[in-house]
Image (cartoon, rainbow, N blue to C red):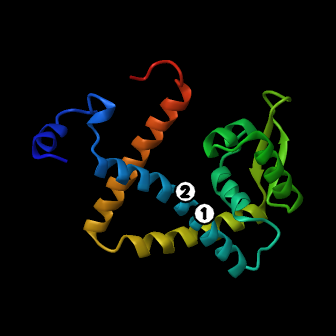
Amino acid sequence: MSTQRRAGAESKPALDKPDAVDAAELAEYHGLARLIERMHRRFLDVVRAGLLRQGIDDIGPVQALMVMLIGDDEPSVRDLMERGYYLGSNASYSLKILVEAGYIDRGASQRDRRTARLRLTDKGRTLRDELFKLEQVQASALVRNEAEAADLKAAYRTLRRLDRIWGDMVRYAGQGLD
């Protein structure tokens, strides 16, 4: 990035035109997109290893993450799909596995009988607590001092911004985001 653009970049929230990104920045963006995909797979591997260490082999890492998303709430299936960005058929399959394995109860909402509400069972709460401990260990390995905590916050802000941008691109596709 040139020093001229670098100086003005802090005052402008976005670049004026798509061709303002130089080849090095484009390569970093491309690398970031691929890194996110690879990290997600690796994260699922970490969750899978944590499940195996606990002797849990009746669910996979995707179902375990659904348990974490449900937490202490009683979301509807639709809420869970929106929170976790699951596709309908994938979410239904995973929820079926979790119900059959005894990690969640699926019942009708008292307000609207057409809506299914999800609630962790005792077995599901135990799993959630163990997965939370695993996350604490992972976070402790990542953040060992204030500088690393600041790096984590910056990375989180950047990824949230990227999530918003990609979400807007999907929602407003074909509506001229120029």
Whole-number angstrom distance, CA of label 2 to CA of label 1: 7 Å
Label 2, residues with CA under 10 Å away: few <14, some 14-19, many ≥20: few
Read off the residue under disc 2: 37
Q: Nearer the viewer, residue 147 or 172?
A: 172
Q: From what the image shows, is residue 12 above or below residue 139?
A: above
Contact between marks 2 and 1 (CB within 8 A): the answer is yes
Please tell me which residue is depicted at 48% across the width and 37% down the height of the picture: 166
- 34 horizontally vs 4: left or right: right
Read off the residue under disc 1: 41
Please tell me which residue is depicted at 61% across the width and 42% down the height of the picture: 83
Q: From what the image shows, is residue 18 above or below residue 46?
A: above
Q: Position of residue 46 (x, y in %)?
A: 60, 72
Please tell me which residue is depicted at 70% across the width and 73% down the height of the picture: 51
Amino acid under label 2?
Answer: Glu
Q: From what the image shows, is residue 112 above or below residue 58?
A: above
Q: Nearer the viewer, residue 55 or 170?
A: 170
Looking at this rendering, what residue extends furthest in the right direction? 100
Examine the image and state in which quarter residue 148 appears: bottom left
